[in-house]
Image (spheres, rainbow, N blue to C red):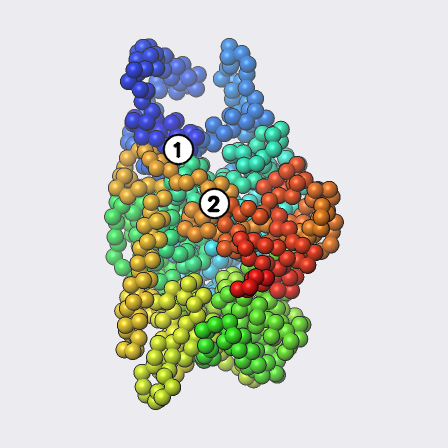
Amino acid sequence: MEWTWPLVAGHHGFFPLASGIKPPAPARGQAEGRRQWSHVQRALLRQVGALLGLDPVAQLVPAEVPSRAQQLHLAGLVMMADQMASGRTYFPGIDDPAKVTLAGARARADRSWTALGMRRGWQNLPVPRDEDFRRRHQEPPRPVQELAAEAARTMPAPGMLIIEAPMGEGKTRAGFMAAEILAARFGFDGVFVGMPRWSVADPMFREVANWVEATQEGLGAQVALLHLWHNFAPEWTALDHATQQQQAAALGACGEEPEVGRPEGAGDQSPSDFFFGTGRALLCPFVVSSVDELLYAAARSNWASVRMAGLLGKVVILDEVHATDVHGAQFLQETLRWLGQARVPVVLLTATLTAPQRQELTDAYAAGITGREDYAGAASPEPEGCARVTALCAPGDGEKASPTSSVRACASFRPDQSYTVEILPEDGSGPATDTAAGSALGAWLAEELADGGCALVVRDTRARAQGLYQLLRERLGPQDVVLLHEHMTARDRALRTARCLRALSARDDGNRPRRLVVVATQVAQESFDVDVDLLVTDLAPIDLLVQRAGRLHRTPGRRRPVRMHTPRLVITGMASGAPPDAGAGDPPGVPGLRYECEQQYGRYPLLIAAHLVREAACGRGEPWVLPRRIPDLVAAGHTEAPDLPRTWHEVAETARRQWWDRRRERTDQARRLLLARRGSGEDGTLAGLHYVAAPVLRGGRGLSALVRGEEPPAEAVVVIGEGRTYRTLTGTLLGEGGHVPASSIDELLTHTLEIPAEYAPLHPQALHPLPAWNKQPRLTTRVALVLDARGHAVLQGRHLRYDTDLGLVDETTADGP
């Protein structure tokens, strides 16, 4: 029974080594009750067993040791029970031990459970049919959706599905359908939906709530929105005004560690405290979140067992899984190992997954199924078709059974289109040339859109997007240009995103303007469901270029301006690379790349992308026919032996070594923080699981820094300060010390801004709560960015300005502001 004591010893979240719980030698006999304690333990166990009707208790000993994943699940439930029992509000103690009875304990537990709102999700869920899909979405299932449903219906046991399909194929609905089938067949009662970033979790929350409500009436209100940053979905924030009973009924809840900075006398943890505070567990039946909440369950820190307990009753859906970087991928693979061992169904959605990524994901889940850390499966075959579904599962209940896999493919529901690739070269050697290149691009766009049309321009940096937006606004007029980037207040960004989605909808022509240019950063490459006539993008790795191209001519058959009758992908942000005296047949020189772009993506993948783009622009090689060629292009962008021009070889080899060295460094950094160290043995116990704990990083930013391996942006509420008086960006005057009436807090929070990490490290000195916020529960953990009357502030020596049109602007120069 060596596996049982860590469940008790780890009830606060850390699992020590066996040597760590032994008393020191001088006190060993006394601490153990002079050998009488073991007799008391046995007598107590017999008495409790008799009261519970479990006599003899020895018959309850498992025939075999549970897997470590099952042990971690049990440990999470023990920890949850400990938290429930520690809450005086819901589980008041009894002063006189003589009055403790089993009946009384059961009654108190029942009252606590009811008050906390703990409940199941799906119950007696029927397996959905194709007719259910048609009824919910008012359209028949598309090929990839039918493929995913069939794979889920024929899996012999819970397992993992990887749904790969081009942008706009309906992967999200395919994932929902597959998850619902798996839950109904194998008895899972909830779902976790993880998104690549917090900003795309908000709209997904609404989709999941509608889907869950359609499966069983009344369940849509139980969907919880959890992510690293505080959210602004009205359906969710409205619960802040509800009573504790209404919140518990809507969410289900549990207790967790009180927040840092929580004022004394604020009361015990309640369901609302838990879900609206900094600690967020996964015990709600239905959860939508950034993927970080899942990755943190695989980190060697406390609360991992509670998080894993929350996951083990759910089907896990992860969207845009290809977007996980090499550091986060280690945590994702660790999570898949635990989930595979626990037989938790997982559905992965992706548009541009590379073959090595696919192999790593399937091997990680299979390692959990088999209990073999070194599991390496055969490479998956490459079937015909641009959409594919990979299914992986154990054939039965055997712990050591070899996993089975299958791969099915289908064609796209959209017709193939031949994309024209063009290059607008620019010299990126300095700010002056950047301005000149922006002016040239602005003039070119004005000419191309003279007869109308809708264009999307994706820039690699906020500054480039802001500069081009200002030029286009002067040329085309403010009504024809929209700027969108991540460093705007939640209010400004939400309004602009809604305008873009409404005007450029892939499903509706009713609000489409005659001319519109959206200038955006990378926020436009994920979960941005628009259809544009022309796409201009800075150079990026080939899979991201393909992802962005998914916004171009997204709706077949739509009438477009004559110049944009065929899809045109225009690449900027790179110099031509051709020497001045080069002839038409001469090999090209290495193209000039922008420094900021190299820092973000790495030079090596950019060189490969530049070569593929140049080949297409020059008419060499096979045309870019999408979506059919998406798998080929993604594979070419990540091959270990790219066919680059001979004049690039020396530069490319140097870039390749730097690229792989950096990847290995980030991989090693992440592996030191994984929940289970390699070689610890999958068949062992939880003892020593936290032999070295991860650093304690409190709050959403610390959590994100741990699993992403870099300092994340900060979040602050932007206010204008004039002396001791504060007001919001929209002019609403705040009370003394920044006091906000309860009815105005939601409006205040819409002015929350994501601040880049270089301006606000993990512990910024210039960001603090306003004085009155420490007495307002919803604002105790908030910080304010206080601007002067002109909208300026100084952070980390940088002179910043917030502009309602441009967003956050860095006005720092070599000479100061």
Q: Nearer the viewer, residue 262 or 793?
A: 793
Kindly identify which numbered label has been placed on residue 215.
none
Depth check, mark 2 against mark 1: the one in front is 2
Q: Is residue 776 above or below residue 494?
A: above
Crowd around label 1: few <14 · some 14–19 · many ≥20 (10 Å): many
Q: Is residue 592 above or below residue 45?
A: below
Q: Earlier in the sequence, mark 2 or mark 1?
A: 1
Is any atom of residue 632 visible in this view? Answer: no
* Residue beneath disc 2: 702
Question: Which element carries disc 2, helix, strand or loop?
Answer: helix
Q: Is residue 492 left or right of residue 636?
A: right
Q: Residue at x 39, y 30 (%)?
A: 10
Residue 435, x across and y down, in percent: 54, 75
Label 2 with label 1: CB-CB less than 8 Å: no
Q: Nearer the viewer, residue 745 or 409?
A: 745
Which residue type carries mark 1? Phe
Q: Residue at x 50, y 12 (%)?
A: 97
Q: Nearer the viewer, residue 379 or 345?
A: 379
Q: Residue at x 62, y 64 (%)?
A: 806
- Quarter the C terminus occupies: bottom right
Which residue type carries mark 2? Gly
* Residue beneath disc 1: 14
Residue 113, x across and y down, in percent: 54, 30
Q: Is residue 595 left or right of residue 513?
A: left
Is any atom of residue 269 visible in this view? Answer: yes
